[in-house]
Image: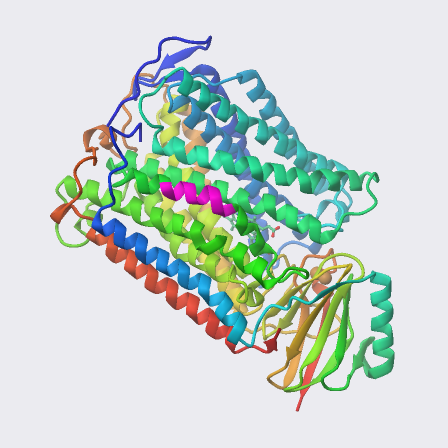
Amino acid sequence: MLAPQRVWWQPLSRMERSWVIVAFVLCLFFTAMMPFWFVVGRQNVPVTTYRVDPKVYEQVVNDFIAEYKVDEINGIPVVEPPPGGEIYMLARQWQWSPILKLKKGETYKLHLSSTDILHGFSLQPTNMNLMVMPGYDYVAEITPTQVGEYAIVCNEYCGIGHHLMVTKLIVTD
Amino acid sequence: MAVATMPAPSAKADFRTCPVTGLKVDLAAERLIIVNAVAAVVFLLIGGFYALLLALTRWQAIHLLPADWFYRVLTGHGFDMLVAWIVFFEVAGLYFGGAVMLNARLVAPKVAWLAYILMVVGAVLVNVMTLVAPFDQGAVMFTSYVPLQAHPLWYLGVILFAVGALVAVFIFFATIITAKKERTYEGSMPLVAFGLMAAAIIAVYTLLSGAVAYVPTFLWSIGILPSIDPAFYRNFFWSFGHPAQQINLAAMVAIWYGLAAVTVGANPVNEKLSRFAFILYLFFINLGSAHHLLVDPGYSFAWKATNTSYAMYLAVLGSLIHAFSIPAAVEVAQRRRGFTSGLFGWLKNAPWREPGFSTLVISMVLFGFIGGTTGVVIGTEQINLLAHNTMRLPGHFHATVVAGTTLAFMGFSYYLIPLIFRRKLRLVSWASWQPYIFGLGMALVSIGMIVSGLQGVPRRHWDITFSGAPIDVTLPGATQISLAIMGVGALIAIVGGIMYLAVILASVLTGQKEEARRLTLVMSDQNPLVEHALPNVGKEPEGKESPRGTLVIGVIFIVTFMIYYLSNWWLLGRGWFIR
Ligand code: HEM
Ligand SMILES: [Cu+2]
Ligand SMILES: [Cu+2]
């Protein structure tokens, strides 16, 4: 524990050397996995982002809802957009809007933004999570691969009503 | 083992000579170590009480607190534990490593007191505002993500605390530079002090990033700045918040080396390698802040992948080196004492009742097998999609900063009490059991959280039954079980925490004053540091002395790691397509 004696910069022993090599190879493997998956994987983190004024975004979402609204559940509009199009989700304290009806196997451009503070987009039980921020329009190309009813909950703390902030995503054939 | 030599009396400072180590102890440093350690323990006590309330609330079957108190207490727990307990303890550690271990005087003790007062005032301010400010300005989580706006005094508290900590770090640097100049020790700096120095260097750029995040935010909260960009804040917050964790890491590893030396007389087999590993931390760990931003809008894949992997997982390489060096040092020391039978005879004959030793093993195992593996996995760019803001995160860091760092600090403090407080340790059998109980509890807490997170349970969430929400949401029923595991683990860990506090308080308040005393183990009168420590230098461990057992443990670790890592890719591959 005290000062090391004499020379401590002796060469590594054989066992140490092999451990360092194994460890380093492991690190290289971890490093390589990310670009590998970026090229061949089907699940990658979206990168497309635009700056957006929260008021403008709210207007865009309202127009989107008005155009494709088919129903309403407990005050939340249900929207069925044409397959393969741009779709919008708005986060605010403490609601997600709207409820989306999507087709399995179609690819949609999902826009996410907030009009007040940070929220967390969390699709369950698929378990897909993205940050939602005011001022940033985050665009994810998503393709539902199973039919069913999914929940979207908020998983970034956003105040006292954080746990009330849920909506639905319905996928049909 | 080289012993530090007595310095010629240099600048004015009052010393006593420690009868145990022969080191000169600067009395001003000693007092500062004591007050910082006391503050640390007080915040551990408060944070631990909060932990109990939180765990009993998230254990959905009990659901103790109402929403507002849950979020306030959560904010307080995060700050008191992660910031106050850890940093106060680290400051005590820096003064110990800088002044006492190097046999030197503490530079500018008055300034060190000022730093202490700033930190205390800051921490108290944050605690009070968290509880009494209007809900939205108090319950902001210790991260206080803009545009959530805390009370100005809350930010002021954080800033005061950080300034105090920065001053303490500079006092440490001044102390080690003075020690070098005044030649208070011979040869190279001891490894433990070297590790602390690595921690301190990281602390400087960490705290500077903190200033970039907090000072504008404070100005915004009092209306001087019109707005703060939320992405800017998150970026700088994590340039502060992430490396801060690596300070804990470096300090914890330094303590691991210390515990190995104290309890079985282990010396690193190769000091060069251990020091190199600390240097890897220095250079690469600050990149890791990006792993908090992996699913944030606005960053490119290349930027995230480069940073989240610490260039090429080079900081992880540092940890993997320590993960081998420390057990290998223990194994070689044990084998040289004659415990050479089989692969693990050295382990079987280890001092398992000695809290320093059990702490070392439990802290390393839980940190490595749970904390380290899960950390690399959730920090992988794409896999973060599955994990971000779920309970897998608190599961990860309760294995690292609690089962790893906090436990290591606890175990280490049993040895500091006789040295610094000059009191005989009391309740030694409690001390002997405490690491096992706390470790078992935290293992269950971490695993319960991780399994809950895998099923989608969000972190920082008051009610996962979503009662009152406009839409019915049910998470898988097994979450009830995993959250209960977390809750039971929390109760066990709390018992372990109380035992720790009882030992410390009983010893400090009622322990027998003891001046002349050899540095002995807690559970026996031996002093492995002197009796067993054989210099490793010049003699490579060979044949029966070579650390074969450690190599086997290492291989088991890598296999477990790969299984968990690859199964997460498999899990990701089953998800919806997203780009
Ligand atoms: C008996 C020991 C402990 C138990 C049972 C415990 C339990 C918990 C629980 C239940 C949460 C809430 C998780 C959530 O809802 O997101 C939490 C959060 C947290 N804990 Fe602990 N904890 C303990 C000790 C510690 C220690 C010693 C530290 C740090 C050194 C720590 C650091 C944190 C942090 C940073 C958070 C996150 C706060 C946030 O999300 O803002 N905990 N803990
Ligand atoms: Cu929200
Ligand atoms: Cu929320």
Pick out the residue farthest to the bottom.
Answer: A173
- Residue B251 image point, x, y percent: 44, 38
Q: Is residue B511 magenta?
A: no
On screen, residue B530 versus residue B292, left or right, reads left
Q: Nearer the viewer, residue A6 or A79?
A: A6
On screen, residue B377 versus residue A148, left or right, reads left
Residue B390 seen in the current view: no
Q: Ligand 2: give its quadrant.
A: bottom right
Q: Give the main secondary structure, helix, strand or loop, of the magenta stretch.
A: helix
Q: Nearer the viewer, residue B271 or B388?
A: B271
Q: Residue at x 43, y 16 (%)?
A: B26
Q: Is residue A161 above or below residue A171?
A: above
- Residue B101 image point, x, y percent: 37, 24
Q: Is residue B205 above or below residue B29?
A: below
Q: Residue at x 54, y 63 (%)?
A: B381
Q: Residue at x 73, y 60 (%)?
A: A133
**Number of residue marks:** 0
Residues in magenta, as a range: B276-285
- Residue B395 image point, x, y percent: 50, 57
Residue B554, image quadrant? bottom left
- Residue B36 image point, x, y percent: 52, 28
Residue B225, image quadrant? top right
Q: Residue at x 59, y 78 (%)?
A: B576
On screen, residue B400 versus residue A155, left or right, reads left
- The image quadrant where one finds the C terminus of chain B is bottom right
